[in-house]
Image (tube, rainbow, N blue to C red):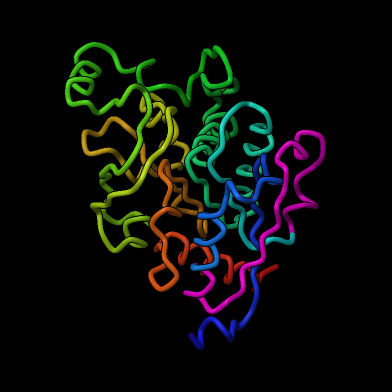
Amino acid sequence: SKRIHNPEGEVTIAVVGKYTGLKDAYKSLIEALSHGGLANRVKVKLDWIESEIFEKEDPAPWLEKVHGILVPGGFGERGSEGKILAAKFARERKVPYFGICFGMQMACIEAARSLAGVDHASSTEFGPTDEPVVGLMTEWLKGNMLEKRRATGDLGGTMRLGAYQAELAKGSKIAEIYGDTQISERHRHRYEVNIDYKQRLEDCGLVFAGMSPDGVLPETVEYPDHPWFIGVQYHPELKSRPLDPHPLFASFISAAVDQSRLV
């Protein structure tokens, strides 16, 4: 309890989303960030930023003074370009970035556009696109593979809901954070990053470090040459507890503490 009462500093995390007026929607996330603060003996101050602002204004003045950027789960096109710009800022300026669910998807679209030359990279969630870096699994899994997944009930309609296993690449940053290469995390989403873009994105430095056990669905991405840039397709905040903070949140806040010494 001493840890709780005597934080040794403060870090500021920008939460870039829409619905930032509805803080209740982010209750688990807010708690998980505070657990990450406890693990590092720092107070975590949240700076809620409406992502649409970045579609009209340069993100730099909003993000230059923060110690970490988190793009949480969300859905729909409104505000998505602003989230993509937040991921770009974090990547270019080497600011710790944590993308959860939609936040991972936007980081992949950013990489495709900025690094892989896929100018029109988008998500089918936003409408028809020639470059579906993000889409419904049913849109690109053809033939036997899809039938096989359907047969095992793995598709659950098109929503992945509940706990799923993932396999993390040995030597990846995320495997180091978990201290393991086999994990189970909770999901709630319909859209997935499209495996067809894996090679092109990896060639540009964005590593698909975590995959579903059958190797079809990307679960985590990271830039090995960035101090801390991780996207996850699942919701780690749902498994965080005050005395047992989720390792990703503890690690993200630790990276924010390092960043706070630079800013």
Q: Which residues are magenta?
A: 36-64
The residue under the point 57% across, 15% down is 127
In this view of the protein, which residue sits in the foreground, 51 or 31? 31
**In front here: 189 or 86?**
189
Residue at the spot 42% in from the left edge and 28% down from the top edge: 190
- Please state if 210 lies on the left or on the right of 7 as rendered: left
* Of residues 193 and 206, the one drawn nearer to the viewer in this rendering: 193
**Where does residue 162 sit, x and y in percent of width and height?**
33, 41
Q: Residue at x 35, y 32 (%)?
A: 160
Residue closest to the eye, 159 or 149: 159
Q: Return the residue found at the far front.
A: 24
Magenta segment includes 240 = no
| Quarter of the picture holding the C terminus | bottom right
Question: Percent from the top left, x then y, of residue 24?
Answer: 60, 50
Q: Is residue 52 left or right of residue 110?
A: right
Residue 241 percent across, percent down from the top left: 41, 65
Residue 257 position (above or below residue 202) = below
Q: Is residue 185 left or right of residue 145?
A: right
Is residue 49 one of those drawn in magenta? yes
Tell me if residue 104 comes above or below residue 176 in the rendering. above
